[in-house]
Amino acid sequence: MSDAMWLRVDEFVNRTIVHEDEPLKSAVRDSAAAGLPAIQVAPNQGKLLQLLAQAVGARRILEIGTLGGYSTIWLAGALPADGELVSLEIDTKHARVARANVDRSGQGGRVKIIVGPAIVSMASLAPPFDFVFIDADKENIPAYFDRSVALSRPGGVIVVDNVVRDGRVADESCADPAVLGVRRLHEMICRDPRVSATTIQTVGVKGYDGLLIALVK
Ligand code: SAH
Ligand code: DHB
Ligand code: MG
């Protein structure tokens, strides 16, 4: 198994069943043109987020880490006309680029982008959220997850991006704060009676990483 094959399979899947529409493609283009890092979810991962949000019948979605609004657009596509997505972003430039991208997708009316440290913004949010996507700074994942559970309705789903990090999550000698964040997340969840969770390793255009999926009981 090679990186080249992962790429080929991602391209095949994205070309056949994923359907990345024009607003999504434009969001990637404009984010790159504005100098944002190209670390958005892959198209097939964005579609997974949308499908999971649809499967839980999400009316209120919380996203932590907006970047240029790419995952935001996928997630907003899961909402009914009167649904709402709140996305938290610390960087004003990222938020500005995301605002334009989301507005161009026609879903701007349902999307609120709050600029500031996510942990601070979360304190002013009220439950219930049906779906949460955690994808901001990795050291703070345990805190984001804990607060996300409190903001979720029973039956809600929380997805955390980048929890495997080239396998380093299982390397006990790794002192990278981002890796410690995802390690601690797993250790914390195993003692948390509020949720049931699993982690799935992923390969593809984003390299070797993984997603954690939790159901709030
Ligand atoms: N979800 C996006 C990618 C997010 S990248 C997508 O898939 O399209 C991570 C984002 O989190 C960056 O834009 C970064 O500025 C933001 N971020 C980093 N630290 C943060 C913090 N403390 N609070 C809120 N956002 C933060
Ligand atoms: C990084 C962040 C992400 O959210 C991601 O999906 C990939 C990489 C990063 O900070 O390097
Ligand atoms: Mg990510």
Image (cartoon, helix red, strand yellow):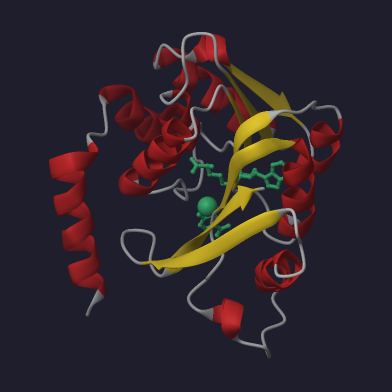
Q: Position of residue 144 (x, y in %)?
A: 75, 49
Q: Position of residue 89 (x, y in %)?
A: 68, 35
Number of on-image labels: 0
User: Image quarter for residue 16?
Assistant: top left
Above or below for 164 versus 54: below
Above or below for 100 versus 201: above
Q: Residue at x 76, y 62 (%)?
A: 192
Above or below for 58 versus 193: above
Q: Position of residue 29 (x, y in %)?
A: 35, 33
Q: Looking at the image, can residue 93 be seen? A: no
Q: Nearer the viewer, residue 76 or 42?
A: 76
On screen, residue 196 versus residue 162, left or right, reads right
Quadrant observed for ligand 2 in the rendered image: bottom right
Q: Residue at x 61, y 40 (%)?
A: 155
On screen, residue 125 versus residue 109, left or right, reads right
On screen, residue 2 versus residue 55, left or right, reads left
Q: Residue at x 51, y 33 (%)?
A: 68
Q: Position of residue 153 (x, y in %)?
A: 69, 34
Q: Looking at the image, can residue 57 be seen? A: yes
